[in-house]
Amino acid sequence: MSRLLLIAFQPTEAALGAGFAAKLGLPFDILSLGGVVAADLGAEKVRYVEPADLPPADGLASAIALYAMGYSHLASVSTMRSKDVLARVAGMMDLAMVTDVIEIDSHTVFKRPIVAGSIIATVEVLSTPVAMTFRPAGFPNSPRSGNSTLEANLIDATSKAKRISASVKGGSRPDLSQAKVVVSGGRPLRDAKTFEEVIGGLADALGGAVGATRAAVDSGIASNELQVGQTGKIVAPDLYIAAGISGSTQHMAGIKDSKIIVAINKDPDAPIFEAADYGLVADLYDAIPELKHLLS
Amino acid sequence: MKILVPIKRVVDPYTKVRPLPDGSGVDTAGVKFEVNPFDEIAVEEAVRLREKIGDVHITVVSIGKAECEEQLRKALAMGADLAILIESEETFDSLSVAKELAVLAKELQPDLILMGKQATDDDCNQVGQMLAAKLDFPQATFASRIEATESGLKVTRETDDGEEILELPFPCLVTADLRLNEPRYIGLPGIIKARSKPLERRQATASPVLKVRTIHLGSPAPREPGRKVGSVQELVAVLKERGAL
């Protein structure tokens, strides 16, 4: 029998997953690894573990595999974490896997971007169970309904890998991959202080998140978790503002699901202008302070 | 120490590729092929580990058509000691690649498998984790820094929230992210000089049993063409009109 297990590494991923589950059209349960989630997301059963330090991938995948028995579909929001762990679960359980699903054609046929988003592949799963990660932009939240059974569980796993330290998400800004507004900056931002003042300042004025290009991260002016693109975060805000970003294919792969893209760049020939809904040819050091002023 | 580095031949990541008109594949006419950039970073890291700790033997392996020799030769020129080409005309999915590599790893008994976090053609990000699972190796994906310790590795890996540090005992598997290193430049003369290094050809141990197959490749829906605005005031006005501010 077909049934979906939605694996939420963060509680916020449960609601995003409910939209995916509704689109897939299968009965589903939730395994929440970051604490209890709402009981009206449409899941029959919610199993949750209290937020704690989860073991590294080798231990965590073994633990998830125990919960995954009997399901035809396993799915998680696409994140670095879910890719790390779910692909290992697929390897352990000998499952088909589809990364970054953006569209569902049937219970076994899915669409996903490849080659930095320049091609959309339609793939068929030839044998279930299948493990999937999906990009939430294509699957709007579904109306709340139902009353799930809630069940507290424990993750009991031993890992050969040992975690020495880990950074925790800091600051008050919204999560980059789920933000409604994203302001991103590139290499022209000079240094970390300027980047934070100019890009961070505009993001705060708009209640948005901060993103960066690979070049900005590589040169040390922005931290790595802010990188947007093929190999960084995929964003899909209502408004994406790109300042001092030329628009490489790899960067564009991470932003093309944004509703409105605004580009501010002093080079009128920058490729980003081809993808932007609104382009402003201007020095960002003039334009962004003026924009902030007009918004206040 | 023995390091195994699986590499993939991919279309040049800096060329724009298109699907064939009938959707049956990628139009590769006139397109160059390269070592998957993340795999190239993995080869470079293996070579740097040898430069740091000395006694390291590096084997690179690729699964695919005879043409993959070109990419294996490049890895040899970068410093690998032995290349293995598992020659096959068949299509593999991630799981069947992992299974084929697992057979080889069981034979070669590497202390470390180093590979790219994903291939820039299919963008799957699966094989490393699947292979680690098949071998029951601990894994560190998205690595940005590797240090050898007495009994294993200390790996800094990028995460959704920043980074974390893992300690892995040997044998283990690490997948390389962008910031692990910048691969050395190898020109044609270097590749020609490495021609005397051994390259071994083998057949795949089993025909791949596909669990996922591609049935169509298409172009993404184009975005509506945009327009330039003349000033910040005009930008604010249009964004307000669209309800974005």
Image (cartoon, rainbow, N blue to C red):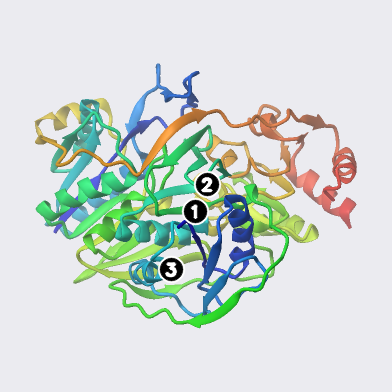
In this rendering, the label closer to the viewer, 3 or 2: 2
What is the quadrant of residue B144 in the picture? bottom left
Q: Chain of mark 1?
A: A
Does residue A72 appear anywhere in the picture? yes
On the image, numbered disc 1 is attached to which residue? Answer: A133
Q: Residue at x 86, y 47 (%)?
A: B243
What is the quadrant of residue B93 in the picture? top left
Do callouts 1 and 2 mark residues in contact (Cβ within 8 Å)? yes
On the image, numbered disc 3 is attached to which residue? Answer: B164
- For the N terminus of chain A, the image quarter is bottom left
Q: Amino acid at mark 1?
A: Thr
Q: Residues within 10 Å of mark 1 (few under 14, many from 20)?
A: many
Residue B195 lies, in percent from the top left, at: 13, 29
Mark 3 vs mark 1, CA separation in Å: 22 Å
Q: Residue at x 46, y 78 (%)?
A: A53
Does residue B79 appear anywhere in the picture? no
Circle 2: element type? strand
On the image, numbered disc 2 is attached to which residue? Answer: A101
- For the C terminus of chain A, the image quarter is bottom right
Residue A190 lies, in percent from the top left, at: 62, 50
Q: Residue at x 24, y 28 (%)?
A: B89
Q: Residue at x 27, y 53 (%)?
A: B114
Circle 1: element type? strand
Q: Is residue B134 left or right of residue A118?
A: left
Whichever of callouts 1 and 2 sits on the residue coming sooner in the sequence is 2
Q: Amino acid at mark 2?
A: Val
On the same chain: label 3 and label 2? no
What is the quadrant of residue B143 in the picture? bottom left
Q: Is residue B91 left or right of residue B205?
A: right
